[in-house]
Image: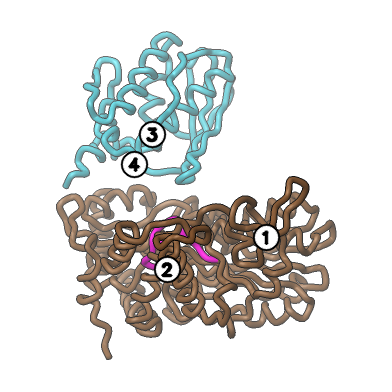
Amino acid sequence: MMLDGLYQEIILDHYKHPHGRGLRDPFDGEAHHVNPTCGDEITVRVSADFSDISYDGLGCSISQASASVLHELLRGRDADEIAGIHEAFVTLMQGRGQVEPDEDVLGDAVAFAGVAKFPARVKCALLPWMAFKDAAARAGVDVGAAPEVKA
Amino acid sequence: MTFDVARVRADFPILSREVNGHPLVYLDSANTSQKPRQVLEVMREHNERHNGNVSRSVHTLGTEATSAYEEARGKIAAFVGATNPDEIVFTKNSTEAINLVAHSLGRHLSLKPGDEVVISEMEHHSNIVPWQLLCERTGATLRWFGVTDDGRLDESALESLINERTKIVSLVHMSNTLGTINDVAAIAERARSFGALVMLDCSQSVPHLPVDVRTLGADFIAFTGHKMLGPTGIGVLWGRYELLAEMPPFLAGGSMIETVTMARTTYAPPPARFEAGTPPIAEAIGLGAAVDYLNALGMDAVHRHEQDITSYALKVLADVPGVRLFGPTTPEGRGGTLSFDVDGVHPHDVGQVLDALGVEVRVGHHCAKPVCARFGVPAMTRASFYLYTTTDEIDALARGLDQVRKVFA
Ligand SMILES: Cc1ncc(COP(=O)(O)O)c(C=O)c1O
């Protein structure tokens, strides 16, 4: 089935067994994002030093797995590293399947390479990342000017 | 005469295509319907042979275009039982038709604080937001009927909801989410007893069942061409002529005037008053052809076929583990639009797996977020049927749902 590219095992694993899910205190910035076309929602909280990134949401496997991967990948890193990973992920998702992901930078997030070939689902994958960026900004940390999302 | 679905399908070129290596199973007609060859050909013929602007040319092409456009108006009037074709206003879609009434009727009635507009929780956003805006502009109050657990309009509050303050009642005739067909006779009668006017959003009913404005109890109805085998870009407002004749214009410009001076303008009578600018001419003619197609089959037969398919689908879905239906569980008082939840799987994922198997359903909130909220879900999966839907396609849906459960087990 041509879905193999979309529903990688890693994605289904993160969806069924999310890492770090649930909103936690204390935090310095919080953002709530909604995808108005499908109603998916996510809330992300960050501490200014990124020692914790917590989240909760409602949505499809892609958006929820993406939040779990984000938690794993970004928690405990410094702002520069985070900006680099964030940019790499956004570039991958906007690459229409033409971008070769770097596993050293993106870790489990490379599993989302296939999602980039499904334009209707790119927004799902990006939802937690955009909420994270806003939450970080509210915590006073700029994690880089990610380009506007065009999906 | 039995309904020959195979013959019907042969008229729809798109139904023979494949999607992702599987035969197309199109279960999204509530969103937009497919178009038969007959409609496509009439539109092509118009553009190739008769194209001219309407109502403003003495030349042959303009005259041919005008008479085809007005002939379409006549067909559509007859299709919904309107005795006067001038009660048919062409719009862009249902949404524009409802906005037209919200603006023009709102002004005609001089709505003000203390007045009430009544809708329901079952509406498509296009029958909610125009009334919210009208109430914001005028200070009138918006009120609404609720929905029962089994997806019917909750009429228990009828007496308090519709009262001497009620000016406009606007309800969906058939829900695009729950499939419920609302019998609005009691509501319309009570509204009339207080002098309130009644609009029905017939976007989902006119395509699928016989609708006759003479017995419906409404003062206005809206419907949209692309859901009834016609093209996009054309919709219809039917209104009682006396009311249309009293209402001020909505959009302004060419074709809607009687005379214009630099100081002031007087307006054409309906329907021209409400058709400012060059209308979607080929689309109106295409909609006329769609109506011809439906008439040739007979709306009773179309409706019966869909009732059969719906009964079958209700039975099949009831046997798929983990599927929870929203809306009436029996075919009585419902149409062929089935929204459901697959336990533990988000509708996006359901839709994606089904699409990989060529089964096209809609997922999301279906432009009816209050309905989703009423049933406590952010989104639903919806399969919707039409005159070309077969029991084999329902079986393909059921097989697809088995696959969904396998992927997300
Ligand atoms: C019940 C109902 N009302 C209104 C509409 C709006 O139709 P349109 O988008 O063609 O204006 C739809 C279709 O989406 C509908 O199902």
| Residues marked 2 and 1, same chain | yes
Whole-angstrom CA distance, mark 1 to mark 4, is 66 Å
- Cβ of mark 1 under 8 A from ligand 1: no
Q: Which amino acid does label 2 sit on?
A: Ala
Q: What residue type is labelled 3?
A: Ala
Q: Mark 1 points at which residue?
A: B258
Q: Name the residue under label 3.
A: A151
> Colour scheme used in the picture?
by chain
Q: Mark 2 points at which residue?
A: B68
Q: Residue at x 43, y 30 (%)?
A: A20
Tell me the chain of label 2.
B
Q: How crowded is mark 1: few (under 14 residues within 10 Å), some or many (20 or more)?
A: few
Callout 2: SS = helix
Region in magenta: B225-236
Q: Residues within 10 Å of mark 2 (few under 14, many from 20)?
A: many
In this rendering, the count of numbered labels is 4
Q: In which quarter of the image is residue B329?
A: bottom left
The tint chain A carries is cyan
Rendering coords of residue A62 (x, y %): 35, 38
Callout 4: SS = helix
Rendering coords of residue B180 (x, y %): 50, 72
In magenta stretch: residue B340: no
